[in-house]
Image (cartoon, rainbow, N blue to C red):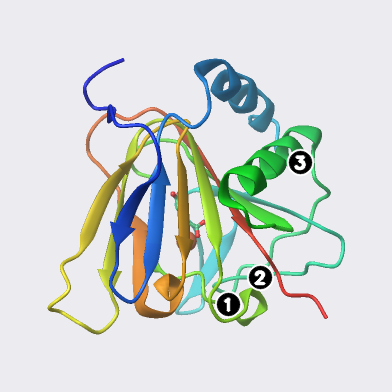
Amino acid sequence: MTDQFSLFRGWQSIDLNDGQARYLNQWLSEQEQATYWQAFQHLAWESPSIRIAGKAIPIPRLNAWYADRNAGYGYSGIKLPRLDWTPELRSLKERVEQATGYSFNAVLANYYRDGNDSVDWHADDEPELGSNPVIASVSLGGVRSFKFKHRQDRSLAPVSLLLEPGSLLEMSGGTQKNWLHKVPKTKKVVDARINLTFRKIICD
Ligand SMILES: O=C(O)CCC(=O)C(=O)O
Ligand SMILES: [Fe+2]
């Protein structure tokens, strides 16, 4: 264990004023991380494009979308095909539900091949997620930094954390309404990273 990993275990709450987040490091054992890492190499990774000024630009990461049959979804103009849960995604979802106390019916998987892959400022505020969505995010592989900034209030300092492999980050309350988040590109040499963001799509 190197000193880039935090030594404190247990939920650490991240004060976002009009939002709420908490972080649990060393949540999955090294063995579990290795098992999930192996299994998730075989998810149906796609490289979706977004249209910017009429041009199709591939997003800087790979994505896959797994969800219950009735949970449709698209985000930022990207429409990913819905796939059925794999056994490993289902078992991880159940563990996330136990740890957080919330239930989820969908997961967006992100693959960051290297430090050039990233996700820019955004909020997971699609109407299908309802008004104060709870999003639980599991990290595997390389350590990446994760940043929050408030949408309006410049007096609230941006918040920066490191998402370590085997960790769980939960965002709730007004976080998606009032804050943006991102995983910035880095020039440091970083291992590939897989992130799974569990969500609950409101189906009627
Ligand atoms: O990779 C991460 O930690 C964040 C991913 C994310 O924000 C998202 O999928 O909406
Ligand atoms: Fe997000």
Amino acid type at image mark 1: Glu
Mark 2 lies on residue: 74
Residue in the image at 48% along x and 31% along y: 166
The quadrant holding residue 147 is bottom left
Amino acid type at image mark 3: Arg
Nearer to the camera, 22 or 127:
22
Q: Earlier in the sequence, mark 2 or mark 3?
A: 2
Amino acid type at image mark 2: Gly
- Label 2: which secondary element: loop
Residue 178: x %, y % from top left: 36, 79
The tag on residue 90 is: 3
- Label 3: which secondary element: helix
Residue in the image at 51% along x and 49% along y: 137
Residue 30: x %, y % from top left: 50, 18
Nearer to the camera, 127 or 64:
127
Q: Residues within 10 Å of mark 2 (few under 14, many from 20)?
A: few
Position above or below: 110 against 51: above
Q: Earlier in the sequence, mark 3 or mark 1?
A: 3
Mark 1 lies on residue: 126
